[in-house]
Structure formats: C-alpha cells, structure tokens
Image (tube, rainbow, N blue to C red):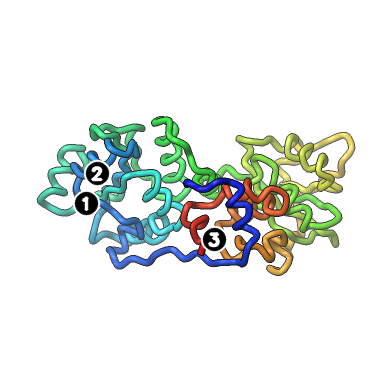
Amino acid sequence: MGMKPAYFALMLMLTPLSFTAASTTQPEEAGKVSWGRILETALTSSAQTGKPVFALFQEIPGCAGCKQFGRDVMSNPLLVEAVETEFTPLLIHNNQGGRDAEVLKRFGEPTWNYQVVRFLNAQGEDIIPRKDQVWDTGGIAARMIATLTQTKRPVPAYLKLLAAENSPQLKQAVFAMYCFWTGEMALGQIDGVITTEAGFMAGREVTMVRYDPAVISLPQLIAAAEKVECANAVSVPAADLASAKTSRLKIGTIAGYRAAPASDQKKQLGGTAAEKLALSPAQATKVNAWIRTNAAKAATFLTPSQLASLQR
C-alpha cells in the first residue's frame, strides 16, 4: 500500500472524509468488478505480477440466481476491491460462442451453467481445486484467502474480516459491564471477536459479541473479557451454557436483549476520519477498537481505496 503506518495514524485523526465505490454499467450478473475478457492477456498479466487469476465463469444474460450473485457477491465493495487489487480478474461468458466457448472447452466448463469461480496460475492451472455451488460472499472470500495462502501472497486483513463476518460458524455472547462504549472498544480488540454491538439487557449496559469459535473458544473469550473488566455477567445461547460455566461468574442465557441507539454505537469512531468511511460491520468493530489507542493498527483493517480517501 506504499504509505507508512505513522502516516495512516495521522490521517485517521484528521477531518472525516467519505469513501464511495465506483459505479458500473456492465451486466448485472458481472457485478462491479472491472473484468478482463481475454484469457491469454490475463495469464500474461499473472505471470508479470504474480497475482492469481480470479476467473468467473458466468451466465450472461443469466437467470435470477446469476443476477443475485452479481448484485450481492460481486458487488460487495470489499470483495470487489480484493479481486481487483490482489488478483487478475477474468470474466468468461458460459453461454456465448467464439473465444468464450474456446475457453469453456479448455477448462471443461459446461455451457449455460451457474456461476463458477476458479483460481488460476500463470499457466492456466487451478491453484486450489475447482468447487461448484460457492455462491455466497463468505465462501468466495474464503477461497480467495486459500488461494493467496497457497501462492504465499499476503492476505489483507480486510479480506480476512470479510470472510469471517460472513461465516455461518460465528457464535454470540453478551457481556455486561459498566459502560458499553468501553465494552465495544475493549472486546473488539480481542482476536477472534468479529463484531460488537452496544445494547441493553436486564436493565444493564451490555456488549453483544459475535466471535469465531475456530479462533477463540468461549472459555477463552470469557477469560479475555474478564481481563479487560468487561464481564460482570455473561449471557450465551442455551446450547452454550455448559461450555460457558465458570467457578465465579454469573452465566445466563441471552434473553430480552435490545440494541442501543445508533448514537451509542462505535463511539470511538466519532470525530475521526474513519467515522464517514463505508465500513463493513467487522471493519467498524476493529477500527473502533483500536483507533484511540493504536491508529496505525486500526488502519491495517482498511482497504487501499479507503486509505487513499483519507488523503483527499
């Protein structure tokens, strides 16, 4: 990204600025990625840059599902930026003749098929095995991460967050403490916590946490919350009660929770440049958690375009 962390830290504290994704007039099924259309050109670019080819085989014009994939997945601004920044984008129509048909034949892709994304090296070989029916943002992001890891290329923090916040494996826990503004900040700093939300339950200020159990177990999360004095009481889904039991803390089930007003959410972002950025929920959580104590770390969760917007 070219700029020093200290500069990012300074820029994050300056006058708020906004980030708006560029619009596009291309077919709805293709989303908002700026695609290449020639395989040979994409492979040459991959060889020169080292970036894997993100090859979308898509039905255009296509069915309702193809259109939804374009609207919901390939138009997600974080996913779009990751495809354009970390990969060589290539779009192949699977219901056309000519060059597209030749590419389908080369890769054994069926015509008039639902969308398939394949990740290719400069020789046109699959970097990770082809997988059908991956039609959601989290699934595509996870395969992008696997591809970058396989090719030993760095994985941006914002892409990891995007995959995590769209994972079906996330769990919830509610922590009561003296101040939910502090709760969002302190709990958001914990590795494995993906999103936080200020709220109320049983007449107390609480922070609702969504966490990744593959990164941090519930007992580990509770211990980390105790360490930062954000676990006066803990509430979890009934199915998690057994694993949440401790010898000292009061553990209950989540009931009657309600979110605090928008004005009480992500309070640490207020008055910073990041306040007006179009952040995903997970980005907002992590930037909010770090911006007052380590702005350089907060900046690592932003995309290159978001960071560039802070200079304007």
Q: Residue furthest left?
A: 98
Q: Which mark is residue 42?
A: 2
Circle 1 is placed at which residue position? 37
Residue ID at (22%, 41%): 109
Q: Which mark is residue 310?
A: 3
Residue ID at (84%, 52%): 177
Residue 71: % across, % down:
39, 61
Left or right: residue 202 versus residue 210 is right
> Which image quadrant for residue 191?
top right
In front: mark 2 or mark 3?
Answer: 3
Left or right: residue 197 versus residue 175 is left
Q: Amino acid at mark 3?
A: Leu
Other-residue count near label 1 (Cα within 10 Å), few / some / many at <14 / 14–19 / ≥20:
some
Other-residue count near label 3 (Cα within 10 Å), few / some / many at <14 / 14–19 / ≥20:
many
- Which badge, 2 or 1, comes first in the chain's sequence? 1
Residue 32: % across, % down:
36, 60
Q: Is residue 109 visible?
A: yes
Q: Amino acid at mark 1?
A: Arg
Q: Amino acid at mark 2?
A: Ala
Q: Which mark is residue 166?
A: none
